[in-house]
Amino acid sequence: MRILLAVSNNLENDQRVNKVATSLFEMGHEVKVLGVKKPTWTHYEKEYETARFSVWFKKSILFYIEYTVRLFFHLLFEKCDVIWANDTDTIMPCVLVGRMRGKQVVSDSHELFPEVPEVTDRKTVKAVWTKIEDWFLPKADANITVCQSIADYYNNKYKVPFHVVRNIPFYKEYEGRREANDLYPQIPRGKRIILYQGAVNVGRGIEWIIDAMPLVNEDAIFVIAGEGDLYEELKKKASDRIIFLGHIPYQKLRDLTLCADMGVCLLEAKGLSYYYALPNRVFDLISAHVPILATDFPEIRRVVEKYESGELISQHEPEYLAGVINGMLSKEIDHEKFAKAAEELCWNREQKVLEEVIMGLKIK
């Protein structure tokens, strides 16, 4: 089959879409991923085909309107058997074209889109995205999402089944700890590394760690890998103990993860999307044998508790947080336990659900 996957980003940092596209390609399908050229973009080449649209508007509602129109007309004339919508911001043109052309449509919801912090406090914007989901999500021929809590939420709301395909990395055998200074000279040699990897946005708990660092053992530093809305504001707090690396391509991210002594996955309760979240960095850290300091939210708890891979917290006062961090840094890592968890939590197993979804489609 020829499958077109639509996404509203520039493809370079979207591990989820890359894994889905790679798996579909390896199953023998002809795959093309459609994205956007953002202000900073680099050459992007994969086994599967890609295309990125140039857009006049780079953000706000004007970006979504322009991209929706461009995507609609592209899908209308591009040869395909299946149209794959990634998230709510691509579902409308995918379903419309799918119905017009008699093509099968798969929706892949990476989060509860109307409940993300950037949307949930803006009533009009939230109402628009909610209405788009109400109109179009139930009309997809198959629905996928990233965790059971979100699947249950949508199933209860729309009375249609949602398959769960977690955002888990491909299996890689543990290569051993790396020295961060060999990769990034700005990181002092021999320091214990507390790592945050991901978008530097509202509600990610990055400020909590920064505020706790004066109370954390002096041999530890906090390394932040990623960019986002808060990047420039938080970067003002950079010091010899708080280091901002900026954007790291995900192809190079594992090398950095292997340098960490512990990783953080802290989320504020800013809407159901964060509350039900199961970020891919949880699995990236486990794969690299890095203990996790995480918020005690349902999906995160399910993984961290089952695999005994870190500590869960429900408060974030600097003194308390520093105490937990110091305690985690003082413990030796149980590599045998992490190795077993990494074998179970790998995309190689998760992609079997994709095969079931594809087999269930009725191609005309």
Image (cartoon, rainbow, N blue to C red):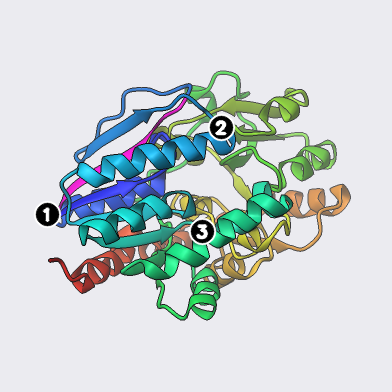
Element type at mark 1: loop
Question: In front of the other: label 2 or label 3?
Answer: 3
Q: Label 3 is placed on what type of residue?
A: Ile
The location of residue 323, given as percent across then percent down, is 81, 52
Which label's residue is closer to the chain start, 2 or 3? 2
Quadrant of the rendering where the C terminus is positioned? bottom left
Out of 26 and 303, give the one closest to the viewer.
26
User: In the image, what residue occupies the spot 57% across and 68% down?
Assistant: 299
Quadrant in the picture for residue 160: bottom left
Q: Which mark is residue 59?
A: 2
Which residues are drawn in magenta? 28-38
Q: Are marks 2 and 1 in contact (CB under 8 Å)?
A: no
The amino acid type found where label 1 is placed reads Gly
- At horizontal 13% and vertical 56% (from top left) the residue drawn is 1
Residue 182 % position (x, y):
48, 23
Identify residue type, mark 2: Lys
Q: Which residue is mark 1?
A: 28
The residue tagged 3 is 132
Q: Nearer the viewer, residue 224 or 179?
A: 224
Gap between marks 2 and 3 measured at Cα: 19 Å
User: Which residue is at a point 77% across and 34% down the rendered structure image?
Assistant: 218
Q: Which of disc 1 and disc 2 is earlier in sequence?
A: 1
Q: Position of residue 202 (x, y in %)?
A: 70, 43
Q: Are marks 1 and 3 in contact (CB under 8 Å)?
A: no
Tell me which residue sits at (49%, 39%) in the image: 65
Q: Residues within 10 Å of mark 2 (few under 14, many from 20)?
A: few
The x, y position of residue 236, in whole percent, is 76, 23
